[in-house]
Amino acid sequence: MKRRKAGKERKKELYELVKSEKKLQRREYMSFLERISEASSMTADISGDFCITLAGQNCMVVRNYRSISEYTVSKIRLKTSHNELIVEGAALQLEYSMEEELKIRGKITRIEFPSGTEGA
């Protein structure tokens, strides 16, 4: 009888542990989304004419960029008419790249608009 009760208590502890871990992951993901939201709302003020569209944490479309200045699996640096856009993450790849639009796939962990940069 004590074993059964101990087993139930252990299951409850494990359930609570998993539940709290999921809450933490959700909180971290929401924090990531908030940072992305802030960054994307600043694009009109900072960059002038380029536009980014995010689909979750694994897909990003950039419109009206000028050129790709760096491309690795962990970092993609783009030049825009007035700034730079740096995308960092893991397993990043360009799904397509056209004259005015490109699509980035992979686990996007950071988007940065370095201050004080000028487009060429």
Image (cartoon, rainbow, N blue to C red):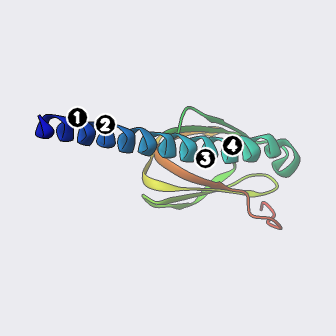
Q: Is residue 93 above or below residue 4?
A: below
Q: Which label sits in the foreground, 1 or 4?
A: 1
10 Å crowding of disc 3: few (<14), some (14-19), many (20+): some
- Spatial CA distance of label 4 from label 3 is 5 Å
- Number of the label disc, if any, that sits on residue 37: none
10 Å crowding of disc 1: few (<14), some (14-19), many (20+): few
Name the residue beneath numbered marker 3: 32
Q: Position of residue 32 (x, y in %)?
A: 60, 47
- Which badge, 4 or 2, is on the more N-terminal residue? 2
Q: Position of residue 94 (x, y in %)?
A: 47, 45
Give SS at disc 3.
Answer: helix
Name the residue beneath numbered marker 4: 34
Q: Quadrant of the C terminus?
A: bottom right
Q: Which label sits in the foreground, 3 or 1?
A: 1
Q: Mark 4 is on which residue type?
A: Glu
- Residue 2 falls left or right of residue 45: left
Q: Mark 2 is on which residue type?
A: Lys
Name the residue beneath numbered marker 1: 8
Q: Position of residue 50 (x, y in %)?
A: 75, 42
- Which badge, 1 or 4, is on the more N-terminal residue? 1
Contact flag, marks 2 and 1 (Cβ < 8 Å): yes
Contact flag, marks 4 and 3 (Cβ < 8 Å): yes
10 Å crowding of disc 2: few (<14), some (14-19), many (20+): few
- Residue 64 falls left or right of residue 47: left
Q: Mark 1 is on which residue type?
A: Lys
Give SS at disc 2.
Answer: helix
- Residue 96 visible in the displayed image: no
Q: Position of residue 33 (x, y in %)?
A: 63, 41
